[in-house]
Image: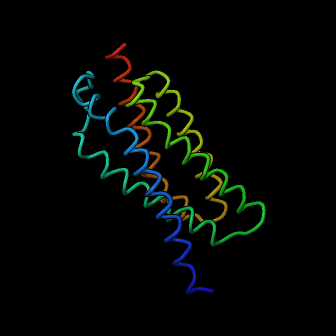
């Protein structure tokens, strides 16, 4: 059975990275428009940094959920999986709201929802696998920064 653990990690890494790639693909035209026409706060990082950071965050998220799913069964496992999939779906829709629709206010509140879901997920994971929960800390920090950045863009482009 231990030899099969890599399949769990591979599955969740692939699913998570593909979800992120699909969101990036679907919002690519909106991202280009954003780069050219939207006023950004002075603390906005360069555009090339976002896909790099997100690829790393998706990897950490996938490792985290894999660790949790391998350590528990029953209701705790189902709960962990539901939280993960829910936050992944909310995460997937954010760039569409922000870049494609340029609904910066709605995207900000959507990001607040995502942050709350990830806090809930982290607290749930902590009960099952503390290291899995710690792997979500960079994600939470980035979401906090993204919220500040999203709010700044919203205020500059009302």
Q: In the visual, does 37 lie left or right of 133?
A: left
Above or below, comparing residue 14 to residue 55 in the picture:
below
Image location (x, y in percent) of residue 66: 56, 67
Quarter holding the C terminus is top left
Q: How many marks?
A: 0
The residue lying toward the viewer, choosing from 27 and 123, is 27
Image location (x, y in percent) of residue 118: 56, 46
Examine the image and state in which quarter residue 146 appears. Answer: top left
Identify the residue shown where x is 31% and y is 45%: 50
Examine the image and state in which quarter residue 5 appears. Answer: bottom right
Above or below, comparing residue 114 to residue 129 in the picture:
above
- Seen as rendered, the residue at the extreme top is 158
Q: In the visual, does 35 lie left or right of 97?
A: left
Image location (x, y in percent) of residue 36: 21, 27
Quarter holding the N terminus is bottom right
The residue lying toward the viewer, choosing from 83 and 13, is 13
Q: In the visual, does 4 lie left or right of 29?
A: right
Image location (x, y in percent) of residue 12: 53, 64
Identify the residue shown where x is 34% and y is 23%: 153
Q: How is the image coloured?
A: rainbow
- Seen as rendered, the residue at the extreme right is 75
Q: In the visual, does 121 lie left or right of 41?
A: right
Identify the residue shown where x is 57% and y is 62%: 65
The residue lying toward the viewer, choosing from 99 and 66, is 99
Examine the image and state in which quarter residue 101 appears. Answer: top left
């Amino acid at each position: 059975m231990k030899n099969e653990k890599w399949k769990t990690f591979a599955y969740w890494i692939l699913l998570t990275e593909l979800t992120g790639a699909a969101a990036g693909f679907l919002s690519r035209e909106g991202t280009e428009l954003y780069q050219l026409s939207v006023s950004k706060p002075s603390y906005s990082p360069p555009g090339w940094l976002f896909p790099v950071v997100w690829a790393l965050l998706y990897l950490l998220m996938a490792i985290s959920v894999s660790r949790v799913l391998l350590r528990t069964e029953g209701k705790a496992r189902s709960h962990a999986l539901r939280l993960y999939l829910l936050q992944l779906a909310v995460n997937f829709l954010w760039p569409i709201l922000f870049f494609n629709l340029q609904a910066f206010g709605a995207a900000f509140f959507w990001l607040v929802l995502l942050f709350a879901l990830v806090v809930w997920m982290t607290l749930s994971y902590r009960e099952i696998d503390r290291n899995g929960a710690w792997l979500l800390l960079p994600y939470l920090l980035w979401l906090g920064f993204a919220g500040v950045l999203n709010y700044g863009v919203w205020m500059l482009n009302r």
